Image (spheres, rainbow, N blue to C red):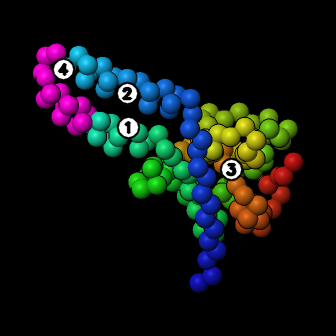
Amino acid sequence: MNDALYEHLVARKPRFTDTLIRIGIIIFLILVVIIGMTHLGSFIILIVAVLGFLTHTFIFAKLNVEYEYTLLNHDIDIDAIYSKSKRKKQLSFDFQKAEIIAPKNSHRIRSYQPEKTYDFTSGLPDAKVYAIMINIEAKRACVLVEPDQGMLDFIKPWMGSKIHFD
């Protein structure tokens, strides 16, 4: 079998809300220590250590995200990788069924009105983001990806006139 495989990894930039969540949790834990010392004494340190471990494991880990695009022939799988250790499948589809693939700010995309938008990009303002307009679960969706040149070269033979670079 002659399967064609391509993988591309994009790290999401930390958002402002991520920073606010981290700061809020740290302030909360400090306040718990200060207030708890008056009522529970040094036992509060153990409680805060357990709370700190749980927040680090279940909340902070979800704030550090990378997206991996895996293309196998004309199928694309998009996974989120949290803290470089936990992987979760986000979306899979056949990109040959896409109506159009073009840069996010292209005039060719403006006429499409998606019901849902999936953003799997780094969030950097100077990033070259492409929009894939496709029907997912019987709804028109816009999937935002950040391909490199190798990924675009991989997709081009499969898509033909449906892919635009302007």
Label tally:
4
Q: Is 150 in front, or is 32?
A: 32
User: Along the polypeptide, which appears first: circle 4 or circle 1?
Assistant: 4
Q: CA distance from mark 2 to mark 4?
A: 18 Å
User: Along the polypeptide, which appears first: circle 2 or circle 1?
Assistant: 2
Label 4 crowd bin: few (<14), some (14–19), many (20+), radius 10 Å? some
Which amino acid type is marked by label 2? Ile
Q: CA distance from mark 1 to mark 3?
A: 25 Å
Q: CA distance from mark 2 to mark 1?
A: 10 Å
Contact, mark 1 vs mark 3 (Cβ under 8 Å): no
Q: Secondary structure at mark 3?
A: loop
Instruction: Kindly identify which residue carries mark 4.
Output: 37
Label 2 crowd bin: few (<14), some (14–19), many (20+), radius 10 Å? some
Numbered badge on residue 117: none
The quadrant of the image that shows the N terminus is: bottom right
Numbered badge on residue 146: 3
Q: Is residue 4 left or right of residue 68?
A: right
Instruction: Kindly identify which residue carries mark 1.
Output: 59
Q: Secondary structure at mark 1?
A: helix
Residue 127 at x, y percent in the picture: 73, 45
* Residue depth check, mark 2 versus mark 4: number of the one nearer the observer: 4
Query: Within the image, what quadrant is residue 142 found in?
Result: top right
* Residue at screen point 79% across, 55% down: 163
Which amino acid type is marked by label 1? Ile
